[in-house]
Amino acid sequence: MDNNMEKTPEPDITRGAELFDRKNCISCHATDGSGTGNETGPALWGENSFNDAAGMARFSKAAGYIQNNMPRGLENTLTDQEAADLAAFMLSHERPVADKSEVGTYHLNPGRDYITKERRKKIRDKTFDWESLDSVKKAKQ
Ligand code: HEC
């Protein structure tokens, strides 16, 4: 995912949940994603986290950020698949819904990978079609 044109692998949130524990994200971001503080680890979901119009609410952006910056101190150690699984797991949780004025037509374009409230629910139910996003490539079977 170093190359912006490269697509993000189709994720699996069950693997993402395991990785969140195994890669020690919980030590700074807490098991429930509520964080340990803005300096030590901000909230990743829940009421104190970024809202769903933030760049970080885009699946591809979150995966790229996680791969390049996390786990803090061990940056660039996650594979593309691991970063995608972690991003999907993080974005499957509820977070503040952006004010309508913040949500432009860009955000609402269905090919864009903002993970909206409707998508979060489908992701948790495992009925979300990841390939409907322009940024996602199909998982290898
Ligand atoms: C040693 C502590 C530490 C660990 C471990 C860690 N993080 Fe972080 N994380 C931070 C800090 C601190 C920030 C705030 C940005 C910064 O200072 O780099 C952050 C920021 C983030 C953000 C951006 C949040 C925002 O509001 O923009 C995401 C996403 C994230 N971390 C995910 C993860 C994931 C996933 C893992 C596990 C693979 C992880 N982090 C492991 C400390 C940590």
Image (spheres, helix red, strand yellow):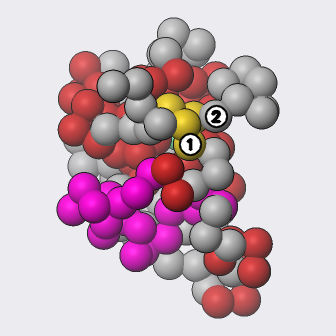
Decide: is 23 above or below 104: above
Residue 95 is tagged as none
Q: Disc 1 designates what residue?
A: 136
Residue stretch in magenta: 112-130
Q: Is residue 16 visible?
A: yes
Residue positioned 50% across, 78% down in the render: 97
Amino acid type of the residue that numbered disc 1 sits on in the rendered structure: Val
Question: In the rendered view of the protein, which quadrant contains the C terminus?
Answer: top left
Amino acid type of the residue that numbered disc 2 sits on in the rendered structure: Lys
Distance from Cα at disc 1 to Cα at disc 2? 5 Å
Q: Residue furthest front?
A: 141
Nearer to us in this view, 47 or 93: 93
Nearer to us in this view, 56 or 125: 125
Nearer to us in this view, 60 or 43: 60
Asked if residue 92 lies left or right of residue 63, the reply is left
As for residue 7 lying within the magenta part, the answer is no
Asked whether the beta carbons under mark 1 and mark 2 sit within 8 Å of each other, the answer is yes
Asked if residue 57 lies left or right of residue 125, the reply is right
State the image coordinates of residue 83 (x, y, percent, origin top left). Answer: 48, 28
Residue positioned 77% across, 24% down in the render: 3
